[in-house]
Image (tube, grey):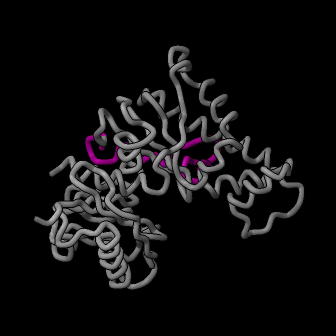
């Protein structure tokens, strides 16, 4: 008898990642990845999605159709009708009914959720938040993502927009611009005594800070204060058991953790400061698709 399996997909503006999972939520093989090509014709992206799912099945040694497909994608989106609406990251898929595509091409129903919510779910069930009642998942990358899980399930809110905080204000900017990779660059430009190359990235600024460059160190510390303010604002509302950080920028947590914690604790109620904790993702790049597969598993 052929093994029953799930497919988890992480659909981003840059890449599509997929993997197969068993019905207990364990990954069966290596993760397959292909570029999204979101600025090209829709057929290109959909072809790559089919190819990446096929490769994921080969990596896992499974055959046939999955019992369900879970997908995490950047918002806004319509999970109930499985429709994508992200104009910035997935312009060629705006309005596309990805659920119908999944049933036609993969022979299985699709369960769609916000990618940051899938990150939070993956960490809550299988990673750094395992065993914790309320997990706040934060992704720091090209933007600022937020997902909430309660007792191991995604909390989506009344209109499926819980955690959509990108444009909430922090300082003179918003979460998405201030608390992201581009946010690090903005802080570096503010502190640099010389003209900064337009192509500089948060990764390069991280390298400079670790090599002792004063301007880069100050930029990361200032960035930490903004992230701490944003996280504390969320914690004052949600009161999570733990905050799990993921995304490419979080890999430099040691450069901004101190100011993040100082800034956050200064805002939190006294009774929250002791239990307040921020931990790094355990699942890394696989958290989103792990959570997507878990989301599908829970809805079977």
- State the residue at coordinates (83%, 52%): 211
Residue 116 percent coordinates (x, y): 41, 50
In the image: residue 290, left or right of residue 181: left
- Split into 4 quadrants, where in the image is the N terminus? bottom left
The foreground one among 134 and 199 is 134
Q: Position of residue 221 (x, y in %)?
A: 73, 41
Q: Is residue 279 visible?
A: yes
Image spot of residue 4 (x, y percent)? 17, 60
In the picture as drawn, the residue positioned furthest to the front comes out as 1
Residue ranking furthest to the top: 271
* Magenta stretch, main secondary structure class: loop
Q: Residue at x 79, y 50 (%)?
A: 209
Residue at the image position 73 percent from the left and 61 percent from the top: 204
Residue shown at the point (78%, 50%) measured from the top left: 210
Q: Which residues are magenta?
A: 155-179
Q: Quadrant of residue 273?
A: top right
Q: Nearer the viewer, residue 30 or 45?
A: 30
Q: Nearer the viewer, residue 73 or 282?
A: 282
Residue 93 in view here: no
Left or right, 34 with reference to 65: right
Is 288 magenta? The answer is no
User: Is residue 172 one of those drawn in magenta?
Assistant: yes
Question: Please, is residue 165 above or below residue 185 in the view?
Answer: above
Q: Is residue 155 above or below residue 97?
A: above
């Amino acid at each position: 008898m052929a093994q029953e399996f799930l497919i988890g997909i992480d659909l981003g503006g840059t890449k599509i990642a997929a993997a197969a999972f068993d019905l207990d939520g364990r990954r069966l093989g290596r993760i397959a990845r292909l570029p999204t090509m979101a600025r090209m014709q829709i057929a290109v992206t959909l072809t790559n999605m089919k190819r990446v799912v096929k490769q994921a099945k080969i990596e896992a040694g499974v055959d046939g159709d999955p019992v369900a497909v879970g997908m995490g994608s950047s918002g806004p989106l319509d999970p109930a009708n499985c429709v994508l609406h992200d104009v910035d990251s997935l312009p060629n898929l705006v309005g596309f009914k990805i659920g119908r595509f999944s049933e036609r091409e993969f022979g299985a129903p699709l369960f769609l959720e916000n990618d940051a919510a899938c990150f939070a779910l993956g960490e809550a069930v299988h990673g750094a938040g395992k065993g914790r009642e309320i997990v706040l998942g934060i992704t720091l990358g090209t933007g600022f993502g937020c997902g909430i899980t309660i007792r191991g399930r995604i909390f989506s809110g009344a209109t499926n927009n819980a955690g959509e905080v990108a444009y909430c204000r922090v300082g003179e900017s918003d979460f998405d611009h201030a608390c992201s990779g581009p946010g690090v660059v903005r802080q570096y430009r503010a502190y640099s005594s010389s003209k900064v190359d337009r192509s500089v990235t948060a990764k390069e600024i991280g390298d400079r800070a670790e090599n002792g460059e004063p301007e880069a160190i100050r930029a990361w510390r200032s960035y930490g204060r903004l992230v701490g303010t944003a996280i504390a604002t969320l914690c004052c509302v949600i009161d999570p058991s733990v905050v799990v950080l993921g995304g490419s920028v979080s890999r430099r947590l040691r450069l901004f953790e101190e100011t993040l914690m100082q800034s956050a604790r200064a805002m939190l109620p006294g009774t929250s400061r002791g239990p307040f904790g921020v931990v790094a993702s355990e699942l890394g790049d696989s958290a989103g698709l792990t959570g997507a597969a878990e989301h599908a598993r829970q809805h079977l």
